Amino acid sequence: DDEADDADPIIFTKEYNLGGNLLRIRAMPQHTGIVACWTEDGPVQALDLRDQCSQLNDPKSWIAQQAQKRLKKKKDVSFFKSSSQDHAADGFALAWNPKAEGLLASGDSNGKINIWQRSSESGAGFTATPLQGHEGSVEDLQWSPTQENVLSSCSVDGTIRMWDVRDLKSPEKLKWTADAVDINVISWNMNAGAGQFMASGSDAGVFKVWDLRMVKRADVTPISEFNFHQESISSIEWCPLNSSLLAVASSDMVTFWDFSVERDEEVRETAPDDDTAVPPQLMFLHQGVEECKEIHWHTQIPGLMIATDLNGFQFFKPVNWKSMLQ
């Protein structure tokens, strides 16, 4: 009824103290209650939060237990922590493999990447395989949507690199210079039939789309390049429900781009060739963020975007989302 619609929402939460400022957190695709996180000046950790998630799925039982003050000994949900030998510095790059359960990649500010293999349900037997090659901080990692052994990385050295984690002697298979400045983020298109496309965002506010079938050439160039954002690109992600739709975030805005849209030639002849021109691929612009750090498409609610910024979480959906997802 109307009164119920006007009531304030009830939010249930469970907390876990990580002991430091959180830099990055990622949930395992196969078991979303298992997460990896990295704290400032701390180790890479893997946490089993499945009990906490199940309590949130049954809040009435949880509330009853709290009311009766049933105190239970808290178990340590952290079942893995990296050592200082594994990573001598902290970092922002974390990625679970979507095709190989328990395979985690981490990249630190010294340019080192580790591949962690979770070999059992209890987490025992985690082993690290190092990947060296970047000449600066590793900023982001993405696993291939089709090949479970292929990992991509980007760095402040301006390069994007491809690794085959099976080849311990020579794992780096491909690299190219994506920009003259830091490459902050990359996103591999996970949609069926679109795995050849990768997007990257740089410190210069430029984002590019690459066709990975063409990067083996010496004169590799992106198939699309936009300098619309005026601030450093902080997050970028392909829509999981539409292979041509890309979301891009910088400090002060979030934009949606549709790469199925082609520029009209008649408009091309009369449009101004400067920064004031609005690209036809730009479908939506949201300027209600402050120091936006990360964006993600909601995988179950079409058109819904989740963003984190200085003030917390934001949830928004464009009024034209249906036309964008057609």
Image (tube, grey):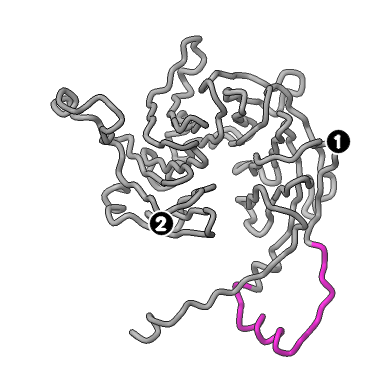
Q: Amino acid at mark 2?
A: Leu
**Mark earlier in primary sequence (1, 2):** 1
Image quadrant assignment for residue 53: bottom right
Does residue 59 show up magenta in the picture?
A: yes
Q: Quadrant of the N terminus?
A: bottom left
Residue 162's x, y, as percent?
Answer: 60, 25
Specify the farthest residue to the bottom: 68
At horizontal 52% and vertical 15% (from top left) the residue drawn is 216
- Residue pointed to by mark 1: 85
Image quadrant assignment for residue 305: bottom left
Does residue 47 show up magenta in the picture?
A: no
Q: Which residues are magenta?
A: 56-76
Question: CA separation, marks 1 and 2?
Answer: 41 Å
At horizontal 34% and vertical 47% (from top left) the residue drawn is 285
At horizontal 44% and vertical 24% (from top left) the residue drawn is 211
Image quadrant assignment for residue 184: top right
* Left or right: where 239 falls relative to 72: left
At horizontal 13% and vertical 26% (from top left) the residue drawn is 266
Residue 70's x, y, as percent?
Answer: 78, 85
What secondary structure is found at the residue carrying circle 1? Answer: loop
User: Residue 109, labelled with which disc?
Assistant: none
Q: Amino acid at mark 1?
A: Gln
- Residue pointed to by mark 2: 304
